[in-house]
Amino acid sequence: MTFPTPDTPTAPPLSPQDLASLGSLGKLPSLVRQLSTLGGCSRPVRLDGHRTEVDTATGLVLRHLGSAQMPAGCLLVRCGNRRATRCPSCAEVYRQDTFQLITAGLRGGKTVPDIVGRHPRVFATFTAPSFGPVHNRPTGSSNAARRCR
């Protein structure tokens, strides 16, 4: 079975042979469960490594999880990209989170007191005053400044 590389936008379709081999190994349900946590992410990040939980008092290993034991052979996590052209699913999650943060800042909620909703709101943009040329001015052979294009 092959999984997409980071530069491919979508996973290749599984062949019937791939599905049959996963089903015969009993890995198909766990692979479906692992892929469902991605929430439609088109460019998941592949993490490789292990995690070991040790009881500090006794030194006994409580749990050990290696990425090779995962159904896909690695841990897959959402890419978290904010650009809809890269990953529409992660961009939508970011958009919704941003909306909730801004709304909570204007109305209150999400650990922001409701009293902020009664305060006046102003969305002001300020531009700094101009202190001369703002562009790099290339010079010619005579050290005279040339016109900016």
Image (spheres, grey):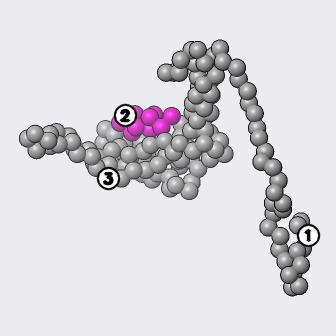
State which quadrant residue 82 falls in. top right
Gap in angstroms between the C-alphas marked 3 and 2: 23 Å
Q: Nearer the viewer, mark 3 or mark 2?
A: 3
Pointer 3: what residue? 49
Q: Can you say whether 22 is above or below 149 in the image?
A: above
- Which element type, helix, strand or loop, lies under badge 2? helix
Side of 65 relative to 21 (left or right) = left
* Nearer to the camera, 4 or 22: 4
Asked whether the viewer can see residue 141, the reply is yes
Tell me, yes or no, whether the two marked residues, 2 and 1, touch with CB atoms within 8 Å. no
Magenta segment, which residues?
A: 30-39
Tell me, yes or no, whether the two marked residues, 3 and 1, touch with CB atoms within 8 Å. no
* Nearer to the camera, 130 or 18: 130
Q: Can you say whether 68 is above or below 138 in the image?
A: above
Q: Which disc is residue 113 wearing? A: none
Gap in angstroms between the C-alphas marked 2 and 1: 67 Å
Q: Nearer the viewer, mark 2 or mark 1?
A: 1
Amino acid on which the number 2 mark rests in the picture:
Pro
Q: Can you say whether 91 is above or below 133 in the image?
A: above
Disc nearer the start of the sequence (2/1): 2
Give the crowd class for mark 3: few <14, some 14-19, many >=20 residues within 10 Å: few
Q: Which disc is residue 29 wearing? A: 2
Residue 112, percent across and down? Answer: 53, 21
- Which element type, helix, strand or loop, lies under badge 1? loop
